[in-house]
Amino acid sequence: MDSDLRVGGKWRMRGVARGNAFTCHGEYTRIERPRLLEFTWNPSWQGETTESLVRFDLDEKDGVTIVRVTHSGLTPAARASHKGWPQVLSWLKAYSE
């Protein structure tokens, strides 16, 4: 993953899923450390679609951090195909533990 973590900075990731190469890229739109990260989302697997927005809200209390992910601006077809966030959050949980 390439990342220029600042408002207006670009990010790009590459990978392979089920034998198919993919990319996803965007731009950071809001960063309020340590509680908010927001960025645009442009995945290659959806072809020509409208850009969407991903927002991570983090709320820490007594050593426990609650993470809420909001993915907005998806078309109905894109919404039906977006099932990866639970998996991403499980990876984040495993990494942090």
Image: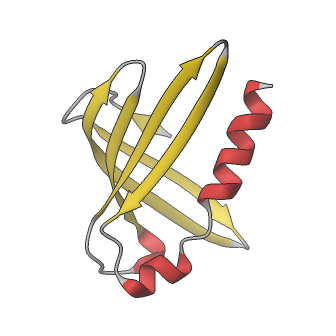
Q: As displayed, is residue 15 above or below residue 65?
A: below
Question: Which residue corresponds to the image point at 65% horizontal and 50% vertical from the top-left?
Answer: 88
* Foreground residue among 49 and 17: 49
User: With respect to residue 76, does 54 lie above or below?
Assistant: above
The quadrant of the picture occupied by the C terminus is top right
Tell me which residue sits at (30%, 68%) in the image. 73
Query: Which residue is at a point 43% across and 58% down the rendered structure image?
Result: 24
Q: Is residue 48 left or right of residue 54?
A: left
Q: Position of residue 3 (x, y in %)?
A: 39, 34
**Image color mode:** secondary structure
The image quadrant that residue 78 belongs to is bottom left
| Left or right relative to 38: residue 59 | right
- In the figure, 23 relative to 90: above or below? below
Residue 15, horizontal then vertical, whole percent = 60, 57
Q: Is residue 1 left or right of residue 9?
A: right
- For the residue pair 89 and 18, the one nearer the viewer reads as 89
Q: Nearer the viewer, residue 69 or 13?
A: 69
Which residue lies most toward the front here? 62
